[in-house]
Amino acid sequence: MNPWDIGSPLYRKLVISAMVLIGAGILLSIIAAGAGLQPLVWAALAIIITGLLTHLAGLVVRARDARARRAAARPQKN
């Protein structure tokens, strides 16, 4: 099983959002650097950082889900 198959809907949304943000930031930074627009380069950097933070949030959600699955699979003591 891979994380995508067993991941929660929140995890999937966070991963896709992170990829979109990082991709948009990279594309924007390339365009801004080519056009020589320094303020736009900084905006692109902010978008990339937001994507990375979103990715980290996805990792936290994934770890939380894994802990919950392990706790549910553990036999209960009477």
Image (spheres, helix red, strand yellow):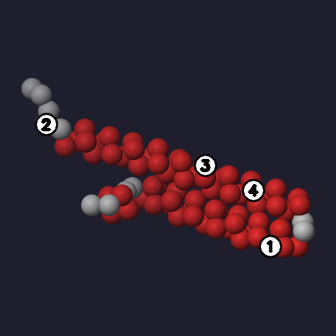
Look at 14% across and 33% down and name the residue there. 76
Outermost residue toward the left in this view: 78
**Cβ atoms under marks 1 and 3 closer than 8 Å:** no
Kindly identify which residue carries mark 2: 75
Q: Residues within 10 Å of mark 4 (few under 14, many from 20)?
A: some
Question: Of callouts 3 and 2, which one flags the residue occurring earlier in the amino acid sequence?
Answer: 3
Report, in whole angstroms, how far the alpha carbon at label 1 lies from the one at label 3.
23 Å
Q: Residues within 10 Å of mark 1 (few under 14, many from 20)?
A: some
Q: Secondary structure at mark 2?
A: loop
Q: Secondary structure at mark 1?
A: helix
Q: What label sits on residue 45 in the rendered view?
A: 4
Report, in whole angstroms, how far the alpha carbon at label 1 lies from the one at label 2.
56 Å
Look at 32% across and 40% down and name the residue there. 67
Q: Which amino acid type corresponds to the residue marked 1 in the rendered image?
A: Ile
Q: Position of residue 61 (x, y in %)?
A: 45, 47
Report, in whole angstroms, how far the alpha carbon at label 1 lies from the one at label 4.
12 Å
Q: Residues within 10 Å of mark 2 (few under 14, many from 20)?
A: few
Q: Secondary structure at mark 4?
A: helix
Q: Which amino acid type corresponds to the residue marked 3 in the rendered image?
A: Leu
Q: How many marks?
A: 4
**Cβ atoms under marks 4 and 2 closer than 8 Å:** no
Q: Which amino acid type corresponds to the residue marked 4 in the rendered image?
A: Leu
Q: Position of residue 6 (x, y in %)?
A: 32, 58
Kindly identify which residue carries mark 3: 53
Q: Nearer the viewer, mark 4 or mark 2?
A: 4
Kindly identify which residue carries mark 1: 31
Q: Which amino acid type corresponds to the residue marked 2 in the rendered image?
A: Pro
**Cβ atoms under marks 3 and 2 closer than 8 Å:** no
Which quarter of the figure is the N terminus placed in?
bottom left
